[in-house]
Amino acid sequence: MTLRLGDVAPDFTAASTHGEIRFHEWIGDGWAILFSHPKDFTPVCTTELGAVAKLKPEFDKRGVKVVGLSVDGVEDHEGWSRDIEATQGVALNFPLIADKNRAVAEAYDMIHPNAEATQTVRSVFVIDNQKKVRLTLTYPASTGRDFDEVLRVVDSLKLTSGSSVATPANWRQGDDVIILASLSDEQAREKFPDGWRAERPYLRYVPDPSKQTGRTA
Ligand code: BEZ
């Protein structure tokens, strides 16, 4: 099944390095990131898992849990975790799902047979506190993902959800944001009484609202 933005992330129960995970229950009231790996004991995956372990405090600060997945078993995951700690200088600090029967991979369409028949591609799903899919990424096996980008998208999603702003290309926390084009100038004046910088009538910039207040606009 193809998952689209706004769909409810499929629930599942699966074995993991942290014991059985009931996915929706495990997510709880926060956000989550589920990401897949083609195979255990592979070099690119090893570096990716180290990168996520190093970024975990940043995901924690944002109330986002992270969980990896591959179609290998828990025993393999545990042996591989020791290699990850030894080579990446950081211990795995989040669960790795062992999706041996590929039930999760199939529910999330993580196997793309024309790319590779038996392994998962590098998928990323950002799931919000309503269990809705807010971002999907699909990378080929040969290309390690940029998890700083995943963090950047989480920041954008959290800032823009239910607000009147969007974030421009290459935006980082603290950069100016864009007033939604659907807001008339009159409506915008109510939300942004200090005004904005207009480069075109439809391209209006205001400072990142979370910079001053910690809240969204
Ligand atoms: C890797 O993680 O290095 C990898 C896995 C599957 C195919 C190619 C590379």
Image (cartoon, rainbow, N blue to C red):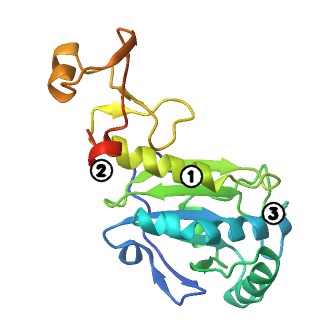
Image position of 165 with respect to 198: above or below: below
Relative to 127, is 89 on the left or the right? right
Q: Name the residue under label 1.
A: 150
Whether the residue carrying mark 2 lies under 8 Å from ligand 1 is answered with no
As rendered, which of 154 and 173 lies closer to the eye? 173
Question: Measured along the vertical axis of the image, is residue 137 above or below residue 175?
Answer: below
Question: Tag 1: residue type?
Answer: Val
The residue pinned by badge 3 equals 44
Return the disc, 3 or 2, that comes first in the chain's sequence.
3
Q: Name the residue under label 2.
A: 214
Residue for point 33% across, 61% down? 129
Residue 67 locus on image (x, y percent): 55, 71
10 Å neighbourhood of mark 2: few (<14), some, or many (≥20)?
few
The kind of residue tagged 3 is: Val
Query: How many residues crowd mark 1 within 10 Å: few (<14), some (14–19), many (20+)?
Result: some
Separation of marks 3 and 2 at Cα, in angstroms: 36 Å
Q: Can residue 64 be seen in this view?
A: no
Under circle 3, the secondary element is: helix
Frontmost residue, 207 versus 181: 207
Report helix, strand or loop for mark 2: loop
The quarter of the picture showing ligand 1: bottom right
First in residue order: circle 3 vs circle 1? 3
Q: Position of residue 197 (x, y in %)?
A: 36, 17
| Residue labelled 1 has its Cβ within 8 Å of some atom of ligand 1 | no
